[in-house]
Image (tube, rainbow, N blue to C red):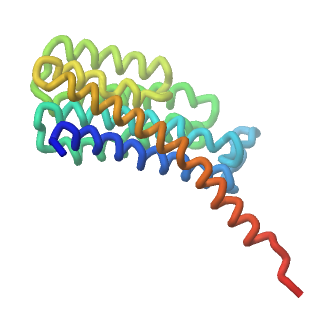
Amino acid sequence: MTNRVASTVLSLGIGVVAGILVTVVTQVATRSTVGGIVDGEAWSLNGNGALVVPLVGIPAVLGAGWAALALRAIGHPWWRPAGVGAAALLGVLGLAAAFGYLLVGRDQAPMAGATVGLLSGVAALGFARLVRPFDRMTIAVGVAVAALSVIVQGEATGLLFPLPTLVAVRTLGRRTSLLIDGLALVVGLMVGIVAAIPLVFAIAGWWYEAHTSEPAG
């Protein structure tokens, strides 16, 4: 297997594993009892509330993955830890955007979301700095990402995260290989999410029957 094929297979595999995790965690959240009341309104992860998992997880995986792939395309030695760190950061920021109102109240939720969006934009520009010193185009894209992240109040800003890094490597990396590996990551993620659904429901059904069946005799 050539290095080119191995690279694409690795991206595909990472996407599949991430997709399976997203589906499993979503199912766990669906059956959880986590919830409460904020400003007189109830919230819960049970049922539709569990959709926060893919809404946070998918942008985090794709955003961090594409940014890490951009670093790998130019042979950056830190692309692995940088990618893991970016995914963790985007996950935390995504959860903060989704649940910030639990800490500050619903009235202050827009301000909290805008703050999360600003932090996400700053982080995106900082990640691009790993590539090389800033140029004007990278800064312009980073500022635009930060502004748009503030406008959408931090929602799904993980998808915007890699843009400054991709701009920074535009004349340095192997753009064709970056595109192929990036698409492999997307395909792998979708395959993992879909493939895990019947498995999760089968395990959930087995668990339900094991804990609800009456003892014999």
In the depicted view, which residue is nearer to us: 107 or 48? 48
Pinpoint residue 73: horizontal percent, then vertical percent. 16, 32
Position of 199 compared to 184: left or right?
right
Quarter of the picture containing the N terminus is top left
Quarter occupied by residue 176: top left
Quarter occupied by residue 48: top right
Q: Residue at x 16, y 42 (%)?
A: 2
How many numbered discs?
Answer: 0
Q: Residue at x 75, y 38 (%)?
A: 41
In the depicted view, which residue is nearer to us: 75 or 161? 75
Position of 115 compared to 106: left or right?
left
In the depicted view, which residue is nearer to us: 52 or 97? 52
Q: Residue at x 10, y 24 (%)?
A: 133
Pinpoint residue 17: horizontal percent, then vertical percent. 41, 49
In the picture as drawn, the residue positioned furthest to the bottom comes out as 217
Position of 51 compared to 47: left or right?
left
In the picture as drawn, the residue positioned furthest to the right comes out as 217
Q: Residue at x 71, y 38 (%)?
A: 39
In the picture as drawn, the residue positioned furthest to the front comes out as 1
Residue 123 visible in the displayed image: no
Pinpoint residue 34: horizontal percent, then vertical percent. 66, 54
Pinpoint residue 77: horizontal percent, then vertical percent. 12, 43
Position of 184 compared to 7: left or right?
right
The answer to whether 202 is drawn above or below residue 104 in the figure is: below
Quarter of the picture containing the C terminus is bottom right
The answer to whether 206 is drawn above or below residue 56 in the figure is: below
The answer to whether 62 is drawn above or below residue 208 in the figure is: above
